[in-house]
Amino acid sequence: MLQGFELWVPPVPLEFDDGMPYYEIIGTDAQIVQFPLKRGRQIMCFSGAMAYMSDGIKMDVQLAGFQKTFGRLAGGGSLFQVTYTNESGDDNAYIACTGDYPGVIVPMNMSSTGKIICLRDSFLCATVGLGRPMTNISAGFNPASNPISFCCSGIDFIVQTVENGEYAFLMAMGTVIKKTLRVGESILVDGDSVLAFESSVTVDVRAVGNIAAICCGGEGIFNTELSGPGTIYLQSMSIDKLRRLFPPHVSSSSGDGDGG
């Protein structure tokens, strides 16, 4: 690949003392992430993300306060915060989560990443380590540098922010490309290609070119400009692009009905 770009592949997860990995990502284009859930450990996720689990795991549903609840909803998350805790006393318990659309699962080590900004609907689930703070999922404004960038960058006005915790897992579609931008380094992208980026990355826009390019290039008036330092994650397909390919069908009533 070109220098500085990486074809993203799931990193090797950390292991427990008995050699079991913290998580396993299974499948190809509609993946599942499976967790061995030791005694007392938790998984938090959005409503409906659980695919299967062993007996003895307790589900708890909370609103977690108005501000946090509103932040999750505005960021594309669910109304309730759902946690699953192993209360069985069995160290061989397990749980698996999957997204509500076909895609690949991208784990983020929040211990080293700190805070990331991602597209709405991207967050899937997170591990909650013993004695570790829970991952905070909230909403934030598009971190564009000026009003024009805010309105025209191709990134939603409201984005999802993921902060703290152990491992967080995002949903992506297609091929995922990772690139670490140096200080002052910029890249032009289509807004639909952005999956996530570190909070140190700045967002701006740049005109695509002359009138012919604007009218006939298929990229609109502006491209999104991401500038370092920081790591960005790009995807070849997004859920928003997929939704535009299959707009909802609206039935219309007609005067040519069966009635006489």
Image (cartoon, rainbow, N blue to C red):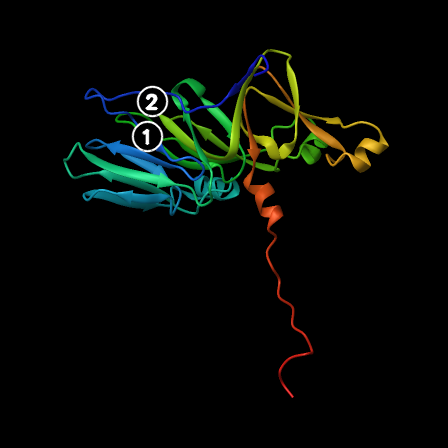
Residue at image coords 28%, 34%:
42
Mark 2 to mark 1 CA distance (whole Å):
8 Å
Circle number at residue 24: 1
Mark closer to the chain start, 2 or 1: 2
Locate residue 21, reporting x and y percent.
28, 25
Total label count?
Answer: 2
Q: Is residue 231 visible?
A: no
Q: Residue furthest right?
A: 211
Q: Which of the two residues, 103 or 65, is positioned nearer the viewer here?
A: 103
Circle number at residue 13: 2
- Which quadrant does the C terminus fall into? bottom right
Locate residue 45, reporting x and y percent.
37, 39
* Amino acid type shown at disc 2: Pro
Vertical relation: 13 (above or below) 160: above
Position of 259 with respect to 54 (left or right) is right
Locate residue 120, reporting x and y percent.
53, 38
Locate residue 218, reporting x and y percent.
74, 36
- Which quadrant does the N terminus fall into? top right
* Amino acid type shown at disc 1: Glu
CB under 8 Å between discs 2 and 1: yes
Label 1 residue SS:
strand
Position of 181 with respect to 83 (left or right) is right
Label 2 residue SS:
loop
Circle number at residue 98: none
